[in-house]
Amino acid sequence: MTHVISIINLKGGVGKTQTTIALSEFLAANYNKKVLIIDLDPQTNATVSLMDENRWLEQDKKGNTVFQLFSDKVYNTKLFNIDNSIVKNVSNIDSGIKNLDLLPSSLRLIDIQDKLPLVSNSGYFIKTPITILKESLANVITNYDYVIIDCPPNLGLITLSGIFISDYYLIPTIPDILSTYGIPQILTRINAFKNDAGINIRPLGIVISMFRSNNRLHNSIVESLKYKERKGDYPRIFDTYIPLSVKISEAAEYQAGVKTLPQKYGYELYDRYNHLVEEVLKYVE
Ligand SMILES: Nc1ncnc2c1ncn2[C@@H]1O[C@H](COP(=O)(O)OP(=O)(O)O)[C@@H](O)[C@H]1O
Ligand SMILES: [Mg+2]
């Protein structure tokens, strides 16, 4: 059975991409899962951290990215091919991680994003671009145990096409005011979309990212998030917090040329991500 998880927050810079990559790498390398990452963010951060940039530019030129998928919908073409687009064994660890695949994004997704609403004529649903990610993945999705979707920081049509195929969504947040500000909106809007579209997505939880344990604001925001969890207003707050770490930003570079996960993340973060993945597995499986 395939489990699909969207990683979302309406704010940029909160750790969405980092969470997507780490969850996927650990699931594939340490838990023997077959994982597909879908990069839906026009910023292409996940893509360029996971594959060689020249190879990606070559693929993009040939239309082998999610750009082509949405462009087909706007211009009524049929150029996107899922098998040619999925890159196998990605990650900057050694020569890639076995069973970790990527459907890359493209900077050109920004242009198509603005044209997409033109295709939709009635509300969210019914032959809008919402269904096209699902349609395009139909023949490959069952090859994977997990599909992890790196969403852009909005709930536009491209994001909703990912939400449409998701069983869960996970919200990474820095425990500060601006990063947590949009959480109620995410919960409300995804719930409304769920009812509209007749899908069964559930919140998986909130992951505290870039946590600074000696920071008073961080600690008090974590407390208030937990209070809202207890009241039932917010989904679960994962027990595992991801600390702020210099190591991560260095290791994110594709050229970093690391050999193993502990080398990439350092031992502390390596442990944290293993714990996080164990929590995810416990709630999902
Ligand atoms: N735990 C962390 N410690 C330090 N830097 C981090 C951590 N997580 C992410 N970063 C860095 O912070 C920046 C934003 O993270 P990113 O995952 O790209 O956020 P988003 O996808 O939400 O925009 C990136 O440069 C990333 O490498
Ligand atoms: Mg990102």
Image: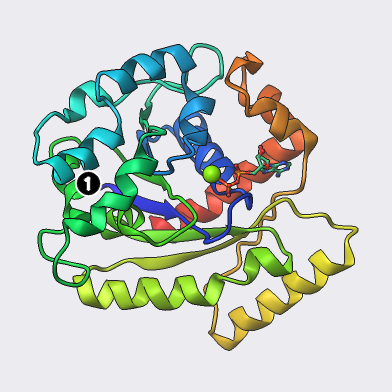
The residue indicated by pointer 1 is: 133
Mark 1 Cα-neighbour bin, 10 Å: few <14, some 14–19, many ≥20: many
Residue sitting at x 69%, y 40%: 271
Residue type, mark 1 in image: Leu
Q: Position of residue 93 (x, y in %)?
A: 56, 19
Residue 239 position by quadrant = bottom right
Residue 284 position by quadrant = bottom left
Q: Can you see residue 52? A: no
In the depicted view, which residue is nearer to us: 77 or 222?
Answer: 77
Q: Position of residue 1 (x, y in %)?
A: 25, 48
Residue sitting at x 26%, y 50%: 115
Helix, strand, or loop for circle 1? helix
Q: Position of residue 170 (x, y in %)?
A: 48, 59
Left or right: 277 with respect to 251? Answer: left
Q: Is residue 143 above or below residue 210?
A: above
- The number of callouts visible is 1
Q: Is residue 230 above or below residue 87?
A: below
